[in-house]
Amino acid sequence: MSTTAQSPLGLFATDDLIGEEDRAIRDTVRRFVDDRIRPGIADWYEQGSFPVRELAPELGRLGVLGMHLEGYGCSGTSATAYGLACMELEAGDSGLRSLVSVQGSLAMFAIWKHGSEEQKQEWLPRMAAGEAIGCFGLTEPDFGSNPAGMRTRAKRDGDDWVLNGSKMWITNGSVADVAVVWAQTEDKVRGFVVPTDTPGFSAPEIKRKVSLRASVTSELVLDDVRLPAEAVLPEVAGLSGPLSCLNEARFGIVFGALGAARDCLETAIRYSREREIFDKPLAAYQLTQAKLADMSLELGKGMLLALQIARLKDEGRIAPEQVSLGKLNNVREAIAIARESRTILGAAGITLEHPIMRHANNLESVLTYEGTSEVHQLVIGRALTGEAAFR
């Protein structure tokens, strides 16, 4: 007997845990993704391109750039609303959510949290509007999980700073107007606000990617980049600065990965109801339903975890290891859901006619950026034991 289909998250009634305003923001972002992103994303992914300059002002008008920050043209939403927006953006594509995350939670947050009033006034309103694009330079070719080993150096020369070094795997780098670059000084690691038209700065784009193809990824090269004294972020010194920004971005991933997983699962459910095998729908077979049930269970558990982490963040009680719990679990389960969903589609699942393989490939990058799974396991392990086992 046929019954009415239920959505995976509907089984968990998670909307009951979300306030009306936050739901309205989520639904607005979902409509934007449906109308503006889905029609073009397969072609952008195949071409290895993304219209950042075209989309950024639209994202600014949507209000999602730096949306969880206060003032300077930012929306000042709850952490929950920001997480839900990230979920809808990544349901479109991880590259879209990465663009918004890097802009708001890395580049803008660094200036908002650690910058001078002059730096905030100069950059944040334009970045919130999508008129200026930002990137965040921390990772280097030889130093990812160990940022303390960075080789990029900033040296004093009179009142100026001179930066030399390189950064790698930088989202938005080739299209950015401003880069927040972290460098070793004679004292501690410091952050610098670097206009990308500064002589000696270049950002060659990284090509031939098979993941995050609808995203601009670049190297940053700093060759005697001379900056005035006021380019330094004045409110922080040491690795606590960039790590505080990474924690902001990781929070968005906790929700974002679920968006990709949900899109894969909904695609698999829809396909299974339409595809006939041996004279009945694929959805009517026990093995198919077992797969769908298990995936829905993991998606729902991930959503409950994300909403709890968002509640803690909104209450100002979030700890880094709690964000690590969410990032580790939700990305890992999202990849598993993408792979299992692909098996339901069979050969159709490997084409860009459906989003599943695109999401699966993207999630392989999400798994290791903003902290690898191993790093997050060790963050959680340190919280449980009191022992740091990173070395």
Image: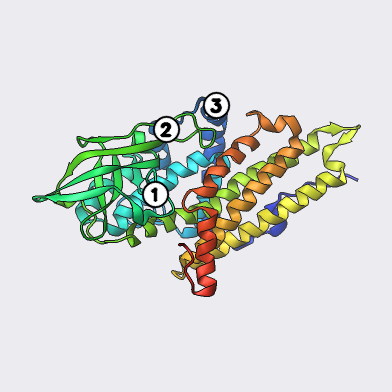
Relative placement, left or right, of 213 versus 60 is right
Amino acid marked by disc 2:
Ile
Name which of mark 3 and mark 2 comes first in the sequence.
3
Amino acid marked by disc 1:
Phe
Q: Residue at x 30, y 43 (%)?
A: 179
Q: Which residue is mark 3?
A: 46
Residue 55 location, x and y as percent? 42, 34
Closest to the observer, 350 or 156:
156
Relative placement, left or right, of 215 versus 119 is right
Name which of mark 1 and mark 2 comes first in the sequence.
1
Q: Residues within 10 Å of mark 1 (few under 14, many from 20)?
A: some
Relative placement, left or right, of 359 versus 162 is right
Question: Is residue 281 shown to the viewer in this render?
Answer: yes
Relative placement, left or right, of 390 versus 151 is right
Q: Residue at x 53, y 66 (%)?
A: 380
Q: Residue furthest front?
A: 391
Question: Is residue 310 shown to the viewer in this render?
Answer: no
Q: Alpha-carbon distance for marks 1 and 2? A: 17 Å
Kindly report which numbered mark, 3 or 2, lies closer to the viewer in this rendering. 2
Residue 47 location, x and y as percent? 51, 25
Q: What element does badge 1 sit on?
A: loop
Q: Which residue is mark 2?
A: 206
User: Marks 3 and 1: in contact by CB < 8 Å?
Assistant: no
Q: Alpha-carbon distance for marks 1 and 3? A: 30 Å
Q: Residue at x 19, y 52 (%)?
A: 118
Q: Which residue is mark 1?
A: 143
